[in-house]
Image (spheres, rainbow, N blue to C red):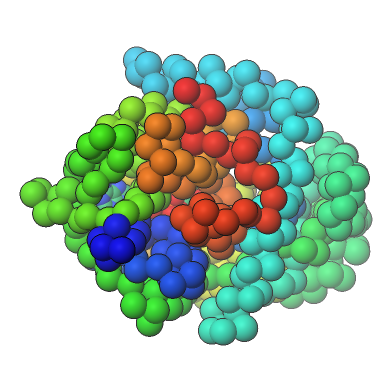
Amino acid sequence: MDPVNQRVIVLGGGVIGLCSAYYALQRGMAVTLIERELPGGDNCSMGNAGMIVPSHFIPLAAPGMIAKGLRWMFNPESPFYIRPRLDPALARWAWLFYRHSNAKHVEKTRELLRDLNLESRRLFAELAQEEEFGLAKRGMLMLCKTAKGLDEEAAVAAAAREIGLEAEVLDAAASARLDPSITMSLAGSVHFPQDCHLDPARFLASLRRRVLALGAEIASGVEIDTLDIQNGKVRALLSKGRRFEGGHFVIAGGSWSPSLLRQAGLKLPLQAGKGYSLTLENPPELPSLCSIFVEAKVAITPMAQSLRFAGTMEVGGLDLSIDPARVRGIVKSVRDYFPRFSETDFKGVKPWSGLRPVSPDGIPYLGPVPHLPNLIAATGHAMMGLSLGPVSGRLVADLLAGEPSFRSIEQMAAGRFS
Ligand SMILES: Cc1cc2nc3c(=O)[nH]c(=O)nc-3n(C[C@H](O)[C@H](O)[C@H](O)COP(=O)(O)OP(=O)(O)OC[C@H]3O[C@@H](n4cnc5c(N)ncnc54)[C@H](O)[C@@H]3O)c2cc1C
């Protein structure tokens, strides 16, 4: 066969694109990875909280989210905000989000999210055996400041156990015993022992090395503007006249995917959800487990000797600018849970921002684009793109090879809202 017809062209050098390239190469396919940033450049996959989360089996679109979201809308320091604007794509996304925020949807999707996260965790462990990238399999703590928060999380723990996940409710003293390296002010916590954490930039660097070693071509600093589609097939991706021809194409462009997929006739409901992270190089204390402040919605992850705080979901378009009020909201919450910390610890720390690609039903898009079987969409991972990176890459490779995947992924169909 003509080698061009065998080549896989992957757009996007974030965790989803890199994992897709890696598992395709593992199957012996020729791969070109296209990324508009230069090597080591930034994207949502670099500065996130680095958590691998079987605990996140409840999608973002869940009961209570709408009421909570509306309350948060009027507080400039709150962890959630939708910037109101006249945009039909945003209106459609918000309507679909509203339609899915119910218990029936959670019940229909929780086993899929569980299976994807557990399979991905297994693949992370497999990858770590070949090259170390700091995978810490110590579990995660949901830290509750209030009794109400703890009651809500205890209900989540019970639901987790119902579907076979491990979860244990702890009072304040038991939480402190589990991680004595950090002073906490809490009502209690829930421990999810199957969760893990890592430094995402280190993991991405390791993936880059692996794909290069397996023979991938990486086109860095190349921004794709056009899909060349002829006779029901994608022929090439184009960048200012440069052509990247192949037999199969994967769009893993994160929050920027919808504009490219529109050229393929797919109106993908997807919004960018901006989040921030702040990394303390010399924190006053260093926990050994990663955790989430439940009421404040802030994630905390130890990465070697540093400590990262991440939070906020701001649905406001493709805008990476920093809103100081929301960053202040993150910083102010820290002392409430970790009393040995103060706001001055964050003086001079530069906030990082990233855009999560958020689908309205909390399920990623992974599958062929309707009527274009050689074009695969792999995006919409929202708050769990790092966690679901390896399993997504593996699923993309299964599709490329025409082989069955480890479970049905019909619910992830790219055209499910068409
Ligand atoms: C504050 C914060 C904390 C988070 N914490 C976690 C966590 O703990 N665990 C977890 O699992 N997830 C977490 N996430 C979510 C996770 O970071 C994302 O889901 C994930 O990074 C998405 O990966 P991606 O590859 O789809 O997108 P990206 O990382 O954005 O990569 C897409 C790439 O495509 C490239 N691209 C786009 N368009 C083009 C084009 N036309 N031509 C060439 N290149 C193009 C972009 O430059 C970019 O590099 C967090 C996110 C944030 C913001």
Q: Nearer the viewer, residue 237 or 337?
A: 237
Left or right for 231, reference 339: left
Q: Residue at x 77, y 25 (%)?
A: 104
User: In this orientation, does residue 5 appear?
Assistant: yes
Q: Position of residue 245 (x, y in %)?
A: 22, 55
Q: Nearer the viewer, residue 12 or 232?
A: 232
Q: Position of residue 170 (x, y in %)?
A: 90, 57
User: In this orientation, does residue 354 appear?
Assistant: no
Left or right for 362, reference 321: right
Q: Residue at x 27, y 65 (%)?
A: 3
Q: Nearer the viewer, residue 65 or 1?
A: 1
Q: Residue at x 34, y 68 (%)?
A: 30
> What is the quadrant of residue 147 in the picture?
top right
Q: Nearer the viewer, residue 125 or 152?
A: 125
Query: Relative to 248, does residue 124 appear above or below in the rendering?
Result: below
Figure disc tally: 0
Figure quadrant of the N terminus:
bottom left
